[in-house]
Image (cartoon, helix red, strand yellow):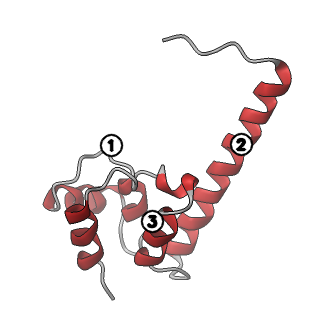
Amino acid sequence: MPLPQLSPEARQQALAKAGAARRTRALVKEDLKKGRVELHEVMQRAETDEVLAKMKVIDLIAALPKFGKTKASAVMVDLDIAENRSIRGLGQNQRGALLQRFAS
């Protein structure tokens, strides 16, 4: 499917929105890595924040302290979560299992 043709100003707006979303996700991942926020707080924020809702679960887990892509992938296999799943796409059981796995 070809990309829609956008006017130059609509393209600039879309680029600015995408950049802001990437910065927001990067800040959340940094906060998780440094322990400033907890996983359950990010999951709760994702219920109302569209940008966080679109964040991939593997990136979320990999952002936790002492976790990387390999450990995150292993956790996702254990919890039966698909590699390409976003936070919004988690089922109730998957969300509960993830929160229980990383409960403080």
- Residue 40 vertical position relative to residue 90 in the rendered view, above or below: below
Would residue 73 appear left or right of 57 to someone viewing this image? left
Return the residue at label 2. Answer: 17
The picture places residue 50, in percent across and down from the top left corner, at 55, 53
Q: Nearer the viewer, mark 2 or mark 1?
A: 2
The picture places residue 44, in percent across and down from the top left corner, at 46, 72
- Is disc 1 placed on a helix, strand or loop? loop
Residue drawn at x 58%, y 57% as measured from the top left: 25
Quadrant of res 48 = bottom right
Rounded to the nearest angstrom, the CA distance separating label 1 from label 3 is 16 Å
Return the residue at label 1. Answer: 84
Residue drawn at x 57%, y 66% as measured from the top left: 28
- Residue 78 vertical position relative to residue 54 in the rendered view, above or below: below
| Residue placed furthest toward the bottom | 104
Return the residue at label 3. Answer: 63
Q: Nearer the viewer, mark 3 or mark 2?
A: 2
Would residue 6 appear left or right of 49 to someone viewing this image? right
First in residue order: circle 1 vs circle 3: 3
Residue drawn at x 26%, y 55% as measured from the top left: 73
Q: Are marks 3 and 2 in contact (CB under 8 Å)?
A: no
Residue drawn at x 20%, y 64% as measured from the top left: 93
Rounded to the nearest angstrom, the CA distance separating label 2 from label 1 is 22 Å
- Is disc 2 placed on a helix, strand or loop? helix
Identity, as a three-letter code, of the amino acid under mark 1:
Asn
Say few, some or many: other residues with alpha carbon within 10 Å of mark 2 (under 14 / 14 to 19 / 20 or more): few
Quadrant of res 100 = bottom left
- Residue 6 vertical position relative to residue 54 in the rendered view, above or below: above
